[in-house]
Image (spheres, rainbow, N blue to C red):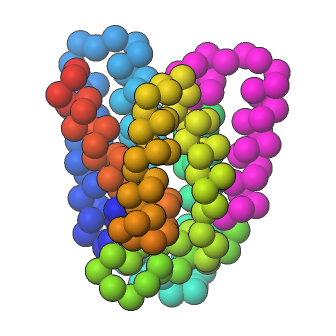
Amino acid sequence: MCFSFEVSIITFIISWSIAIHLLNKKITLKQRNNLIMLMIFSSVQIVDAILWYIKMDKNNINYIVTSFLLPSILSLILYYNVFIRNKNSNKFMKALTIIGCIYLFIRFNGYSVSLCDNKLSSPIWSSNEIKVWEFILFAIFILYPNWKLILLIIFILLPLLHIFVGGSYGSMWCAIANIIALYYLYKY
């Protein structure tokens, strides 16, 4: 989880470095798309790093990062998985993706705050904890058709995060980004 500015920046650098390294190798189109998805996914760490850097003060930077940069990256994740990785042309899926992107901008309008004031503190985007149903739905949208990973995240990582941190599910990006990056480094 992203407990500090340093952890967020290091996560971003590790994920992007591994992805760039692997993109320079001879890989398949599917692998290339997975690496680009990882780069978009781990870009959320820049959002967290900025929020940590400003100490999550309620200022214009917090509002802009939370209300515009974060939902833009999350929307790009949705778009990339649905239309680029899965080449979906279904009108129903197009509509759901557009609705999902609009929802993200509405949902994350506001200021982010810290979960708590200890070493396990993480940003709560838009001062409103992500609901479990939102997390599950987003996980399905961005990971489909990889049901093994979807089930792993929903039934193992999500409960562990709840037990050990008590919330701030959005910051799970940190751990997931590095796990996926290391997995791709090993596999590709």
Up/down of 138 relative to 150, above or below: below
Q: Residue at x 53, y 72 (%)?
A: 124
**Residue sticking out furthest to the left:** 186
Magenta: main secondary structure equals helix
Give x and y (percent) for residue 129.
60, 69
Give x and y (percent) for residue 74.
58, 48
In reply to whether residue 99 is colored magenta, the answer given is yes
Q: Residue at x 49, y 61 (%)?
A: 169
Quarter of the C terminus within the rendering: top left
Q: Is residue 95 left or right of residue 158?
A: right
Regarding residue 81, the answer to whether it shows in the image is yes
Up/down of 177 relative to 71, above or below: above
Q: Is residue 102 left or right of residue 162?
A: right
Up/down of 84 relative to 62, above or below: above
Regarding residue 68, the answer to whether it shows in the image is no
Q: Quadrant of residue 23?
A: top left
Q: Is residue 28 left or right of residue 109?
A: left
Give x and y (percent) for residue 92.
82, 25
Up/down of 175 relative to 89, above or below: below
Q: Residue at x 64, y 43 (%)?
A: 137
Q: Quadrant of residue 25?
A: top left
In reply to whether residue 82 is colored magenta, the answer given is yes
- Looking at the rendered structure, the number of numbered marks drawn on it comes to 0
Q: Nearer the viewer, residue 58 or 133?
A: 133
Quarter of the N terminus within the rendering: bottom left
The magenta region covers 81-108
Give x and y (percent) for residue 170.
50, 59
